[in-house]
Image (tube, coloured by chain):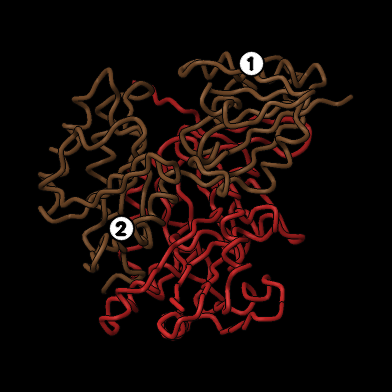
Chain colours: A brown, B red
C-alpha cells in the first residue's frame, strides 16, 4: 500500500463551506491529524483513527503525519480555513525539508479551503474587492518590529488589510499597539470589520470606525479587516455593506 | 415572492472545489447571471434562466441582477474563484450604492469560493504561508503608477505576492515592466510560480527563478505568485515544493 499525506482546509466552520474535494479525502482517510477542535469536526467511523493534539505543536504533528504516511497510511492533516494561509501546510513542508530524504518522495497534496478573511469579507460585503494584504499579527513567530514595519508599508500602499490572530491571550497589548499605530496613519472613519467565528453559531460581525475600535473587540477567533482609504459603507436597514470599489482614480 | 441576490464563487474550475453552499444556491436559483464561461458551468434545468454576458460589462450585469431580484426572482451572479477578490461582489455593491434606494433593502448575500491564488498556492506547496498581498495587475481600473508603487512597497514589506490578471492581450507590456521592476528589487533566485487554469484540464504549474521569468509565461488565465525573500524550494523527483516558512527571524 502506498501512503499519502493530504493537508486539507476545513473552511471557517460550517460544513456547507467544506469543498467536495476535502470531503472525499476525509472519506478515504485512515488517519486524521490536527488541532483538537478541527479533528472533532471529522465524524468517527470504523477504519478511521483520529489523532487530536494541542495548539502550538505543529512540528510534532507534521512529523507524526509524515511518519504515518511513510508507513503506508492515508493521512489527512486538517486545518481550519485554508491550510496554506497561516496554517498547517507550511509547517508540514518545514518538517519535510528538515526530515529524512524519503519524506520528499511521499505523495503530499494540499487541498485549499475557504480562508477566514474571505468568509469574513463575504459577510460584510466586499472589503477585499481591490488590492489587499494578509498579515498574521501574532508575534510568536516573528519580531514585533517586523509586524509594525509591514503595517506601515501596507497603509502607505493603501492596501485593505486582513489580520489573522489579532490578539493573543498571553500578549493582548500587541493589538492595542496595532490599533494605535493605525490611528496615527489613517483617517478616524476608516472602516474596520471584526468578524468572529464566521459561519458558526457563535458568528458575530461588527463594523466599527477606526477611532472607535477597542482591542477587546477581537479575540483568537476573530479575523479583523481594515478597509483601504477607498473603502465605502452603504448604510441601510440592517447591517451596513462594506466594500472597496474595483477601480482607483488616476 | 421575495427576491434575493446571491453573488457566488465557483472556485477556479473543478466542480470538486465548489462549496455545497454555492451548489445549494444554484439549485434554488431562477436566474443565473455572469460572464459566459462561468454561466456555462451551471447546468441547464427547467425553471432556470441563464443570462450569459461578455467580459467588461460588470456594471450592466450587476444592474440587471439587482433589477431581477427586485422583481422577486432568486438570482445568482456567478464569479470564478471568490466573488470578493477582483470579481463581481464589488461591482454589484457599486451598482447598489449608485442605484435606487429600494435596492438597498434587497436580500443580498456573498458566498465565498476558492480564489485562484489559494488554489495555485496549494498546487505549488505553501508559498503564501507567511504574510502576503494580492495585487490586480490590470491597469484597466487603476493607473499604472499605483500598481508600481504597490509593487515597490510590497517588496519592501517582504510580502509574498499574488498577481491577478498579470497580462492583458491589449497591453502585454505591463507585465514585462512588472518583471523588470521586480528584477531590480529582488535577488535573481526569487521563486516565481506561474499557475495557469488551476484545477481544469488545461492546468499548468511552472516554478521559475525570477531571473528566468519571461512575460509570455503568463496569460489571462494565469495567476502569478512571487515568493518573499524567505520562500524556499524543496527539490525532489517531480515538481519542486515551494513554501514560505511560518516564522521570520528576529
Q: Work out whether residue B67 or residue A176 is closer to the camera in this orientation and state it.
A: B67
Residue indicated by mark 1: A63
Give the residue displayed 32% in from the left and 69% down from the top: A245
Say left or right for B55 vs A157.
Answer: right
**Percent position of residue B16, x then y:** 70, 53
Residue at left offset 10%, top offset 47%: A211
- Circle 2 SS class: helix
Q: Which mark is residue A92?
A: none
- Identify the mark at residue B149; answer none if there is no mark: 2
Q: Pointer 1 indicates a residue of which chain?
A: A
Q: Is residue A222 toward the left or the right of residue A92 in the image?
A: left
| Foreground pick, A3 / A79 | A79
Q: Quadrant of residue A109?
A: top right
Q: Is residue A17 above or below residue B142?
A: above
x, y percentage for residue B32?
57, 77
Q: Position of residue B60 (x, y in %)?
A: 44, 86
Q: What is the tally of numbered marks visible in this picture?
A: 2
Q: What secondary structure is marked by label 1?
A: helix
Which residue sits furthest front?
B1
**Residue visible at 75% across and 22% down in the picture:** A69
| Residue pictured at 49% horizontal, 16% vertical | A54
Q: Residues within 10 Å of mark 1 (few under 14, many from 20)?
A: many
- A139 or A27, which lies in front? A27
x and y, in percent, of residue A11 in the image:
53, 42
Amino acid at each position: 500500500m502506498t501512503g499519502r499525506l493530504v493537508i486539507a482546509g476545513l473552511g471557517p466552520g460550517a460544513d456547507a463551506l467544506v469543498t467536495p474535494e476535502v470531503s472525499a479525502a476525509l472519506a478515504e482517510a485512515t488517519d486524521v491529524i490536527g488541532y483538537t477542535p478541527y479533528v472533532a469536526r471529522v465524524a468517527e467511523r470504523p477504519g478511521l483513527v483520529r489523532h487530536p493534539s494541542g495548539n502550538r505543536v505543529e512540528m510534532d504533528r507534521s512529523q507524526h503525519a509524515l511518519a504515518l504516511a511513510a508507513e503506508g497510511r492515508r493521512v489527512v492533516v486538517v486545518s481550519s480555513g485554508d491550510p496554506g494561509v497561516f496554517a498547517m501546510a507550511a509547517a508540514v513542508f518545514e518538517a519535510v525539508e528538515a526530515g529524512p530524504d524519503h519524506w520528499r518522495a511521499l505523495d503530499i497534496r494540499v487541498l485549499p479551503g475557504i480562508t477566514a478573511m474571505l468568509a469574513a469579507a463575504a459577510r460584510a460585503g466586499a472589503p477585499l474587492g481591490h488590492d489587499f494584504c494578509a498579515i498574521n499579527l501574532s508575534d510568536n513567530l516573528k519580531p514585533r518590529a517586523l509586524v509594525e514595519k509591514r503595517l506601515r508599508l501596507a497603509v502607505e500602499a493603501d492596501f485593505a488589510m486582513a489580520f489573522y490572530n489579532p490578539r493573543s491571550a498571553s500578549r493582548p497589548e500587541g493589538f492595542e499597539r496595532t490599533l494605535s499605530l493605525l490611528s496615527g496613519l489613517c483617517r478616524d472613519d476608516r472602516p474596520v470589520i471584526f468578524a468572529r467565528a464566521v459561519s458558526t453559531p457563535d458568528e458575530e460581525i461588527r463594523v466599527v470606525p477606526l477611532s472607535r475600535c477597542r482591542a477587546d473587540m477581537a479575540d483568537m477567533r476573530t479575523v479583523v479587516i481594515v478597509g483601504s482609504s477607498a473603502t465605502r459603507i452603504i448604510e441601510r436597514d440592517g447591517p451596513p455593506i462594506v466594500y472597496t470599489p474595483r477601480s482607483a482614480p488616476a
